[in-house]
Amino acid sequence: MTAHSLAPEHKPKMEAPSIKQLASRHAPLLLTIALIIAGYFAVGSAQTWLTLTVAGLAMGMMIFIMASGVTIVFGLMDIINFGHGAFISIGAFVGASTLAAMGGFAGADNIGLNLIAMGAAILTAIVATALIGWLFERLIVAPVYGNHLSQILTTMGGLIITEQLIHVFWGPDQIFMPKPEALKGAIVVFGAAIEKYRIFAVGVGLVLFAAMMWVMAKTRLGLIVRAGVENPEMVESLGYRIKRLFIYVFMAGSALAGLGGVMWGSYQEIVTASIGFQSMILVFIVVIIGGLGSVGGCFMGALMVGLLNNYTAFAAPKLALVSNIALMVCILMWRPQGMYPVVKAK
Amino acid sequence: MSEPLLTLEGVHTHIAQYHILQGVNLDVPKGGVTMLLGRNGAGKTTTLRTIMGLWQASQGKITFDGQDITRLSTPDISRLGISIVPENMGIFSGLTVEENMRLAVLSGKIADDRLDWIFSAFPPLRTFWKYPAGNLSGGQKQMLSVARAVAEERRLYLIDEPSKGLAPAIVSSLAKAIKDLKRDGATVLLVEQNFSFAKALGDTVSVMDDGHIVHSGSMAELAQDQNLQTRFMGLSMETA
Amino acid sequence: MLSLISHDTPRSKILTVILLAIGIGLLFAPFLFPGSRSMETAARIAVFIVLVASYDLMLGYGGIVSFAHTMFFGFGAYGIAIASDTLGRGFSSLAIGAIAGILVSAVAAVLIGLISLRVRAIFFAMITLAIASAFAVLVSQLSTITGGEDGINYQIPRELTPAFKLMSAKIFDVSVNGKLLNYYLLFFCSAGLFLIMLRIVNSPFGSVLKAIRENDFRAEAIGYRVVIYRTAVTSISAAIAAAAGALYAIWLRYVGPGTALSTEIMVDILLMVVIGGMGTMWGAVVGATVFVLAQNYLQPLMQVAVDATKPLPLIPQLLDPDRWLLWLGLLFILSVYFFPTGIVGRLRKNG
């Protein structure tokens, strides 16, 4: 008797998925829509609901920008970066300095000049955080590759040092970061006041998400990253120098955090060195409920957190953050690996 | 016999606190199929992984075509023209069959005649070309794993137990594909437990036990010698 | 004597001397170092030894990184504060507050452990960070109960305050009053908690924890339910942290976010445990002592350095006492790289 004769040949499952499978696959999207509908009934007024929904989407998009780097870096290299918040802070401070330096452009009554100022703030923040990300990877992450415990400790140390260095260079106080003129104020849609900046944030978030999905689905780089998240060893066996690729991905993740920092900073209009650490709370909630390593999950998770946060902040202001913790607990009880568990080869 | 393409000299490999390879000496001649036999836990998979650089040899030397590759990284070893079909097949289940295949060639473009040959050897890959590889059956995944390793001509193919747990029809299509490779003059190092599969394909054979090579010789010699088989593999091999 | 420390000896001559010096120093602190400032320092050291050792129980023995340890500490501290504030001063308020704080802490740890340790240990670090931060925000918002950012001042039993004189005579020039009693309450409770933890890590339970820390897959394969053990150690650790919080609250007679909840305390704990030596228990004693002393006496020294380097660019900013954390962070990373076993590990290696 030989072993192979025992193994049955499995029928491939290539037929169209059943409704149940479809519902299960799209459950996070359905859940988000349900949340928006539930928000409507909790809030009561259509105008307020519209305002809050746009605010929630805008907040969600900004959290997504900040969180996406954490989830990709973890997925690809199994590194959990507690220092990610440092890049958010640096992005915010560099962006604020650039906006201040271009005060003439940012304060002008000309949307073109305003956008140039905002663009310059974003660009400088991205470049600065990408470079610091490179340093961070080399000095703080690379020596403890493969050891989660040490990674948590050293990256946390890196966050502390960066926050302190921000104090050294920008002083101990919070700094003011006004939005460019054209992004201030609100427009009225169906009787609901919608802040212009929130529309801008939703736009930036959507463009970025679409671009990331396109890179992941359509480009060779995306192919390698997706394969690497599943089985980095096999990707190396096929001849790809994944460690080198990883540095670029780490820098990209840092740059995204920097961009998120600029967006978040000018949304709040006040920037402190601890802005990064504070954002990490929501970032972690988002990547955990989305499924560590999943970009799509991170996006849906960020939207849910943003929406829930705004609805609760209206209905019961003190419970906003607690409601997000409750959301995380519920999702973990439903799917212990997050909404979109990432299949890892062992 | 010609100059060996791959040579392992006194290779030791440690995994955590375990000493798995304890001085492996192995020659893989250029052209033809070298079988690596031995019971479970003898160190066959570790040998392939050490050659590929997936685990670092703690001692000893690995030479490929005259070049010392002991300390090279896995991607660099791959780029010298070595491909591997790993024990767990290493399929990217979230990617389509096509994407799996496209990744297997660094240029991203598989030659047409090569693809025709792969499709004729493994017809299901053509059928499910645009489908996620995770939905394939076990046998089809193994086909994909082998197809990926041979997506372009390589100088050495490392294949780890392709027949494990598969239906006879699939095993014979895999055997046929490896025979095709052999006919084209390829060099293959094949780990096997299935002796009939090994006998049909192997030219030379090395037997491992307890982290050492305990026997090397021609396949024909081992196939005829029941004693040797019993001694080295601890089981009487059926020739079914 | 050896059984008191569960036969877990320091295993190094220098370390033994250091530990004895710390122990004797703390035991006789009111007499050796009179003055309220040094009493405060000694009390802080004693409390942090317990707090850091309880953290080490989780990190060094369980292999779990938590960012909620100050939350557990805060449960104990706020338990005392809220009980004393609402029930009035008295020993029964202290007992109720302490027990409530410890219970809440243990139960919260079990719940967090069960949702996050099921999947992978790193979830625990991320989830505790989120939950502890949310808790801190909640405490500052629910000001009617917690006093918000201002915290709570409350009265403790008169027998534990300086106003209470046990005898009119002085011993070695130190007046024997309630404050002295309070110190010894804190000292002996801390010592007791520390010895309990030593007992735990040297018990069969401790051995299983060490096996899990070395290789959780193998421990699971041998048949230990890793999640259960990890959750259990988390819960014990949280309960002891709450007890430390309660002791500190009785000593300070004030509880606020700065003394019992801030992320800064969390960072301090991490530094103490790494500098002292993870997974050794004795490391907590050395780490907490060195750190608290440095905090109290090195920071003023930094000010001197700032004054000395005033004309130079950038250097004074880097040396500012407010940038204390910068240097600690640096020290922290270097310790993780080069001295992962901390001071205790180093001393043991050198005999």
Image: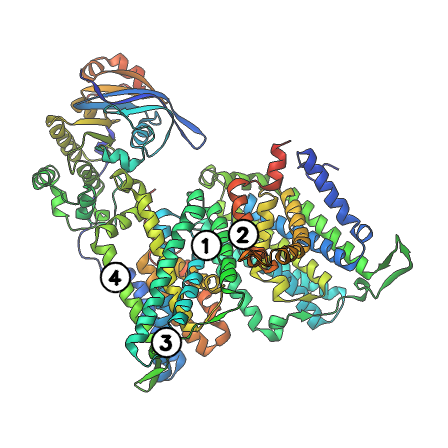
Q: Nearer the viewer, residue A123 or C57?
A: A123
Instruction: Point out residue C225 in the picture as x, y percentages from the top left corner.
Output: 49, 44
How far apart marks 2 and 1 lie (CA) works out to 14 Å
Instruction: Point out residue C125 in the picture as x, y percentages from the top left corner.
Output: 48, 53
Quick check: can you spot residue C262?
yes
Instruction: Point out residue A316 in the picture as x, y percentages from the top left corner.
Output: 48, 77
Amino acid found under the numbered disc labelled 4: Ala
Instruction: Decide: is C111 above or below C9.
Output: below
- Give the mark nearer the N terminus: 3 vs 1: 1
Q: Where is the N terminus of chain A found, in terms of image quarters? A: top left
Amino acid found under the numbered disc labelled 1: Phe
The residue located at (72%, 36%) in the rendering is: C2
The mark closer to the camera, 2 or 1, is 2
Of all chains, the one bearing label 4 is A
Residue extending farthest to the bottom is A191
The mark closer to the camera, 4 or 3, is 3
Judge the density around disc 2: few (<14), some (14-19), many (≥20) Cα neighbours within 10 Å.
Answer: many
Can you tell which mark lies on residue C329?
2
The mark closer to the camera, 3 or 1, is 3
Residue at image mark 1: A82
Q: Are marks 2 and 3 on the same chain?
A: no
Of all chains, the one bearing label 3 is A
Residue at image mark 3: A104
The residue located at (42%, 67%) in the rendering is: A97
SS at mark 3 in the image: helix
How far apart marks 4 and 2 lie (CA) works out to 37 Å
Can you tell which mark lies on residue A211?
4
